Amino acid sequence: MRKHPRSALTLALAAVSVIVLAACGSSSKSSSSSPATGKASGSITITYGTAPDTLDPDAFQTTQAGEADQPVYIPPYTYAETNGIAGTQIIPGLATALPQISADGKTYTFFFRKGLRYSTGQPVHTSDFLTAVERSIKIPWPLGSAFLVPLIVGAKDYESGKSNTVSGITTNDATGQVTIHLTAPYGAFENALAFQAYSPLPKGTPMKDLSSNPPPGVGPYKFSSVVPNVSYTEVKNPYWTPIPGIQSGYANQIVAKISSNTTASALSVLNNSNDVFDWADTIPPSLLPQIQSQASDRYQKLKLNSTYYFFMNQKAKPFSSMLAREAVIVGLNRPALARLGSGFFTPGCFFLPPLMVGHPPSSCPFGDPNSTGDIAKAKMLVQQSGMAGQPVTVWGEERSPRRQFVDYYTSFLNQIGFKATEKIIADATYFPTVGNLKLNAQTGFDDYNQDFPNPIDFYGLLLAGDAITPTGNLNHSQVNDPVINSKANQLGTLFKLPTSSLGSASSQWTTLDEYTAAKAYEAVFGYLEAPEFVSNRIDQSALVFQPINGYWYNTFKLK
């Protein structure tokens, strides 16, 4: 993602941005986040179809939570506040500079800035970084099974209780130095250090999810009130210490309202009673023509690295049978699903999205994804699998169009020979529910937006071992394939080699993604584009859409 002469690891990430992107979040706006003229005050209201799973930075796993936490909790590293390709560039956050990386790629050293304060006025100590890491392990942070515990020396021992601290991290409050020892080279570790879960927290912060009363942060905003699953409000942090590259914020107050009624939310932005429509929601098909004609100057599509699919649990009937999984993929009517998504979906079959390094240019193994599906062949495959009549519970979310995706999918499963019923639950509890292994959910809606532009980010969802966890499990299909486990891990550590770009590994990722599609592990149905849709009060010249976490709240500005 950026060039760093001291490490070939980061050269590989730099190439991802170049190769991948015209991809991530590109728009017609300038890639500069420099201040524009206008009101540096006021209140801005955002509508969200799904509540954050939690507002605690050490417990979240959803995009909605990451977006909300982004202006409150500043990690050692963050992403450039710019649109398009440049928005995937790693820059120093609380650290003074990019890290020094040892020749073997296993030791990272950096220094915290001086004079930082939390929103309570309490000074930040460098050792608070270790406090936050240990808290992320104990709560636990769901993404920690991929981006924390297996990476840092001593993290597993601390997790299991064998040690009372994470031995691989040392801090010095006097000098501000932090040293981190990794278990093995991991080229994307700087990206991991840009997660809010690595943001410092005061010593003594309770080791439990504080979503209703989030802990203090160091960012330009702070949480002032939280009504779970209803709303939250952020206001300016009076103790904010300006940091180069991070906008200090325009609006005095940002209010987020949660409503699964995306039609009402889109209308409220069209009529200027609310200011921002959630980019992770889909504008209802019935409203899209009206918005395109009446608000074309404040609406556009944003490109993402995002894959939408139905998971199929290989540990439970009927999808323990590959023939049953193949039947689903053969018969899916992806164009119909794209229409349900207001045309914001490009039909596809591969797990890696089109703008990601390694996305296969080849044909899909089970038919053209732009076709309406082969129902007759799907029925035959269900009969051959011996799973005809098998009861299936299909899990889904309340909000549109995800509810409609599951309605279609349930009807389709019945059509090809299963006995399917749907189970629709609240959006805020959906992923924690299907991520609980005790439930052993058979199938349901799933999606993934990139955490950073690297194929290993997506393949972390298909790895066994650390990726399949009792709670917060992200591998909902419970894929445990030795080929994927071996090859993805091998490719994920390629950054330790003196390669100048990820392009050298592109063909290997392509081969792996073709293998995964041929095994019918996930019923991929499309790749998402996102709507940028705002009221006529918003200064779009200042607004930055960050391809990793969404909007930078601190760039919301009134005209």
Image (tube, rainbow, N blue to C red):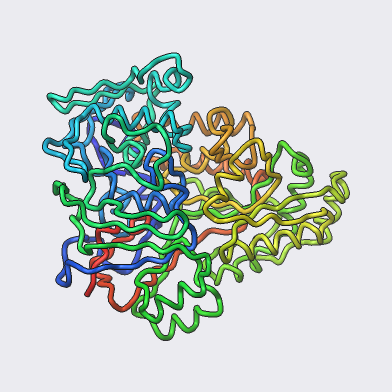
Point out the image quarter for the N terminus. Answer: top left
Q: Residue 92, can we see it?
A: no
Residue at 17 percent across and 25 percent down: it is 173
Q: Quadrant of residue 498?
A: top left
Instruction: Judge whether 14 appears above or below 552 on screen.
Output: above
Vertical arrangement, residue 107 with respect to residue 342, above or below: above
Tell me: 551 left or right of 287. left
x then y, percent, for residue 313: 69, 42
Image quadrant where one finds the C terminus: bottom left
- The residue lying toward the viewer, choosing from 375 and 505, is 375
Q: Residue at x 16, y 36 (%)?
A: 123
Please indicate whether residue 449 sits to the left or right of residue 272 in the image: right
Residue nearer the viewer, 550 or 136: 136
180 vs 443: above or below? above
Instruction: Name the spot of residue 390 as percent of width and height, x first.
Output: 84, 48
Considering depth in this image, is 55 or 15 the residue closer to the camera?
A: 55
